[in-house]
Image (cartoon, helix red, strand yellow):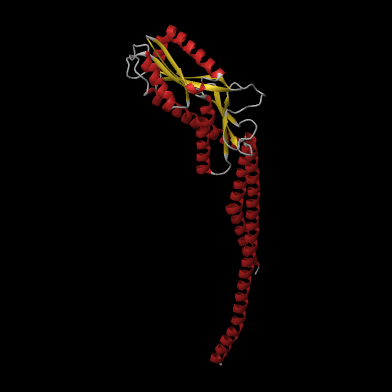
Amino acid sequence: MTKRKFLGGFTRFRLMLTLGLAVLLPAAALIYVNFSQLRAIERDKGIEAIFHREFQEVLLITEKKINKKAYTMAEEARDLFPSPDTDAAEKEKKLDLILSKSPWLSHAFLYDEKGLVFRSQPQQMGDKYFREEHERMAEMYKGWFGMEGKMVVEEIHKKPRAINVSLGQVKRGDKDTYLATALFVLPQLSNDRVVLAGVTFEGCYLTATLFPGVLDEMVNQKSTDQGGNRLAMMIYPADVEMGREIKPLAATAGWGEGKPEISRKMDDVFRGLALGIKFQGTSVEALGKTWVHRSFVILACLSLVILGGLVLTKHIVSKEMALARLKSDFVSNVSHELRTPLALIRLYAETLELG
């Protein structure tokens, strides 16, 4: 009995040791590793960094989409330009036709060896600021091309799409807006000729149609692909001073107020403007804190479940071993009781034989 008790105690100890090494120790290590990772993410703002990298990618794609639309529209207008070898009247007629078919263009012009032909939207010429803008731009391009036309042509030919876009601020009524002028060469001419053409995108079209269209497209695409918190984006002047309120030129629904989480200065077509992005109704910091807090709660719940499972397992193993011990004792007692009568019978039989 003493030996059996000793073996039973050793067996229980071995089972508990196996349970601890096989289950408890890995579970404790896993809990500790996860806790350390969550603390590191919380300290290093890892969630915010992930969101910011994704925001930068979204802004880059958005700028490329805006640039592509602007280049495509400039190329479509370029294909309609008259030959520089036609007379001035024919050039004016063709440029007026381009403007009539493209109400989003404010000006169209063509410069060659004979001089500059500069045309503007006729229905806007009654506006004081627009008329002054027409005269100022015509005088500026005439002087610039006359002095540096050959150098400008050489620079444009070096660009991948042979188009150079510049941004300028002008007045429309009592508000300031931005015009984008696409300057290009005509592809059917030789590179030696100093011929320059261009169109100017109307500021109202940029802020009311082009920019909002691309921004809404990106926001809807991201919401469809990923779900979750909806994005808000805007375009604003890049030279806004620190501390001043940012007034967007174009913004998606749900932007509200406040500064963007991440900004990107546009450096190709619309140099001088910047893109901004954030979540609607919340911030990246708040989302990061919520995620970390939720992860700590889940880790705590899992730890309690593991501990509860270990306690339950220990209880079940103890009961099973106690039951096994009872069965062993019962079998031993029955065997002992059976052995005694059999011994007496055998002794009685042996006595009869001797007698």
Question: Which image quadrant is residue 306 in?
Answer: bottom right
On the question of residue 162 being in view, the answer is: no
Identified at 62% across, 34% down, the residue is: 44
Identified at 45% across, 29% down, the residue is: 69
The image shows residue 13 at horizontal and vertical percentages of: 63, 59
Question: Which image quadrant is residue 11 in?
Answer: bottom right
In the displayed structure, 14 sits above or below 119; it is below
Q: Residue pushed farthest top?
A: 147
Q: Nearer the viewer, residue 354 or 145?
A: 145
Image quarter (top left, top right, bottom left or bottom right) of the C terminus: bottom right
* Horizontal side of residue 277 vs 145, given as left or right: right
The image shows residue 157 at horizontal and vertical percentages of: 38, 16
Image quarter (top left, top right, bottom left or bottom right) of the N terminus: bottom right
The image shows residue 338 at horizontal and vertical percentages of: 59, 82
Tally of numbered discs = 0
The image shows residue 183 at horizontal and vertical percentages of: 43, 18
In the displayed structure, 38 sits above or below 266; it is below
Identified at 60% across, 59% down, the residue is: 15
